Image: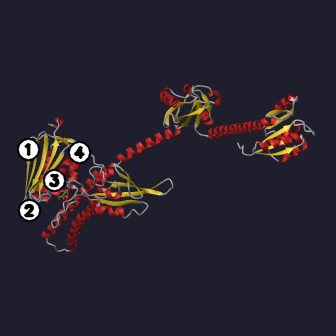
Amino acid sequence: MNTDNIHLLLIEDDIVDQLAFKRMVKSKNLPYSYKIANSVLTAKEILSQENFDVVITDYDLGDGTAFDIFELIVDTPFIFTTGAGDEKIAVEAMKSGAFYYHIKDADRNYLELLPVSINKALKEKYLEKLQKQAEIDLKESESKFRTISSAANDAIIVMDYEGTVQFWNRAAEKIFGYSRKEITGKNLDDLIVPEDANFYFLKGLKYHWEKGINSALGERVEMTARKKSGEFIFVELSISAVKLKDQLNSILVIRDITVQKESKEQLRQSKERLDIILHNIGNGVVAVDCDLKILFANNKTFTLLGFLNKPEEINDLHSLLVNCKNKGITLVNSLEKESFRNLELTVVKPLQRVMYVTATPYKDMNDKTAGKIFILADVTREKEIERMKTDFVSSVTHELRTPITSIKGFTKTMLMNNNLSENNKLEFLEIIFKESNRLESLIEDVLSIAKIESGKVSYKFKKISLAPVIEHVYNIFKMQAAKKDIILTCEIAEGLPQISADQDAIHQVAVNLIGNALKFTTQGGEIKVKLYSENNQLVFRISDNGLGIPLADQKNIFKKFYRVRRPGTEIPGTGLGLSIVQEIVSKHRGKIEMESKENAGTTFSVFFPITENQIS
Ligand code: ADP
């Protein structure tokens, strides 16, 4: 409110009154700037051009009365002056909005009071203006609040001290199913707060009612809430306090998080499922970011890459490849490629293993490559089989070629040479016969293993005595042994029980084991074949004092196609004999053991169980 310069309009037709006013302003040194109108007409003219802080007007103005100009001065406080005896008019003027009236006295003492009235009028006008502005502001902020709260997706609820609802926005209607009309004035916790959540809810309310401070719960709280339909939903609640009309009110902001909660739960479940899968599959799975930092590696990865336990200090891909050949250079060199399949990675420590690595990139939210996922598949066995098969093929080819060349050569000689002596012919025929036998046994071995591999072997179990089978095989090899100057003996215990067995299969076991002994025993050696019973088992034992098996090869000799390499003294074979034996023995629920010393000899012992019903 500015009182340094008050702009006044004095409407007065009496020249003496005008002078008295001027004198008073001057003598009191009042901060007034003023204009004087001496008629209704002039007053109207001035008011149409200028605004004044206060208008002082006389009632009787010659060309009209003060009432004629009231309509022009609605917003400006005016003070009304009138002659004595005109109080009735003065009252009328007050009714029309005049701030004050002064009755003119003959000595013009009323002028003394005029400045006070002017100040009061100004003050009142100022306060009135402030109040009006405050009302406008309040209305504006109320309408803002309503607009915001009705546009909000969260329920906004205002409750009074009693806990009854004062305000309930559109989102609250949508979330809880109660209309504003239905819920206003009702108690909220009876309606939407389930019993188990009451504790938090009431605690929150009580807290801020007592303290009267902003956030009641200090943070957002998750709880369940009940809808009008009775259905329960998950909500996130925050409560704060505001003072409205000197009363503490609670403002509740409630967000329906049911969908988030459910999708979070689904996410958790699928993560758990994924974790179980990743930690239980036979492949290694590693995820790295663009800097090759390891984000995830399943347990199998560490086993495959030669770590005994999950190492603690591993954080990037390079540290994961320390046990690989040349620190995994094959993989490291391929990292520039976005993806690759079946890249060979060799682990050298602690055991040699071969891995196939497949890399696939994964993207971030912006569809940019964020890293790679590597899948490691252990192909050691496949590689070994591959190698063994190649060995086998070349070995079989070699084995087939030798007898065939021999048969072909001798047959050709016989065909082309008509005058061969009978002795020569006989000798050649014997060779052809021997080579044919060799061919036959080779083909049989290959067929047996093929049958075993394809699972097509069917054993014909019958109660039989093993003695005649072993004896028969012994007789077959006796001649060969004699030719090689090897002493082959056979010792079969008396009265051995019969066992349930497949005769042909047992025959093959004996042929393979005695045959091997002969093959790997040098001239002048000795082979002992024994069959006896011990600890409720039939024991078939073949001992020789031949080449023996080097220690490093001993664990492998039962593997298919495995053959001990003996550079210089390569002895023909397919590497199938012992695996066929092992397969047959296990089908008879027996077991086979081997003891050997290089250059000293080998003993194979086969144990067949004798069960009650097998004893004859
Ligand atoms: P093959 O005899 O056709 O090579 P086997 O599976 O019968 O295949 O035998 C595998 C390997 O075991 C042979 O290559 C041989 O080196 C070794 N072996 C088997 N029996 C004996 C034995 N009595 N003495 C020495 N080495 C043997």
Q: Position of residue 446 (x, y in %)?
A: 26, 57
Spatial separation of the CA atoms under disc 1 and disc 4: 24 Å
Task: Tell me, for residue 493, which label it has, or none.
Answer: 1
How packed is label 2: few (under 14 Cα within 10 Å), some, or many (20 or more)?
A: some
Q: Which residue is drawn at 56% across and 36% down?
A: 253
For the C terminus, give its image quadrant: top left
Q: Do callouts 4 and 2 mark residues in contact (Cβ within 8 Å)?
A: no
Q: Can residue 70 be seen in this view?
A: no
Amino acid at circle 3: Leu
Which of discs 1 and 4 lies nearer the camera? The answer is 4
Q: Quadrant location of residue 427?
A: bottom left
Q: Can residue 315 be seen in this view?
A: yes
How packed is label 3: few (under 14 Cα within 10 Å), some, or many (20 or more)?
A: many
Task: Tell me, for residue 22, which label it has, or none.
Answer: none
Q: What residue sits right under mark 2 in the picture?
A: 523
Amino acid at circle 2: Gln
Q: What residue sits right under mark 3 in the picture?
A: 513
Cβ(mark 1) to ligand 1 < 8 Å? no
Taking 519 as reference, is 196 left or right? Answer: right
Q: Where is residue 343 in the image (x, y as percent from the top left)?
A: 36, 61
Judged from the image, the secondary structure of the residue bearing numbered disc 4 is: helix
Judge by depth and name the residue closer to the eye, 535 or 93. 93
Amino acid at circle 1: Ala
